[in-house]
Image (cartoon, grey):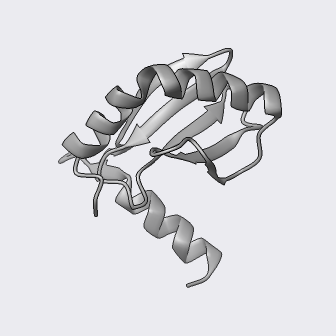
Amino acid sequence: MNPIEIYLLRALNNTQVLPDGTVYEIKQQMGRINGLKIEMYHNDHNPPHFHVKSNCGTIDATFKLDDCSLLNGEISRADYQRIKYFFDSKKEILVKFWEETKGNK
């Protein structure tokens, strides 16, 4: 698959089409930390993970749910410390969301 096909497949897996033809992304914002959004997608692919995006679009990273290690993207040490603090205090909620939305595709 080329990068465009991968992008489209990923986008289609995270969208739903309403009867009127409206397409929207299925995601849940789990929290916010200093301009960073913590998001999870319904029925996302393995391994279990969560996404972090910045309001300005400079950060788009993914972290493993078991230990908060970086799967992809780039992030500063200071931002990682904020994310890790959020993760340590909310891990139970994040894992529950993953399990309840059948993230094990």
Residue at the outermost bottom position: 1
Task: Report which quarter residue 20 is drawn in.
Answer: top left
Above or below for 43 versus 65: below
**Residue 12 appears at what percent x and percent y?**
39, 61
Q: Looking at the image, how many numbered discs can be counted on the residues?
A: 0
Q: Is residue 35 left or right of residue 8?
A: right
Above or below for 48 versus 12: above
Q: Nearer the viewer, residue 26 or 53?
A: 53
Task: Report which quarter residue 32 is drawn in.
Answer: top right
Q: Is residue 105 left or right of residue 49?
A: left
- Residue at image point 57% right, 27% down: 37
Quarter of the image where the C terminus is located: bottom left
Above or below for 68 versus 3: above
Above or below for 20 versus 9: above
- Residue at image point 81% right, 32% down: 77
**Residue 103 appears at what percent x and percent y?**
30, 52
Q: Nearer the viewer, residue 90 or 104?
A: 90
Q: Is residue 16 left or right of residue 82?
A: left
- Residue at image point 44% right, 69% down: 9
**Residue 67 appears at what percent x and percent y?**
52, 43
Q: Nearer the viewer, residue 21 or 36?
A: 36
Quarter of the image where the N terminus is located: bottom right
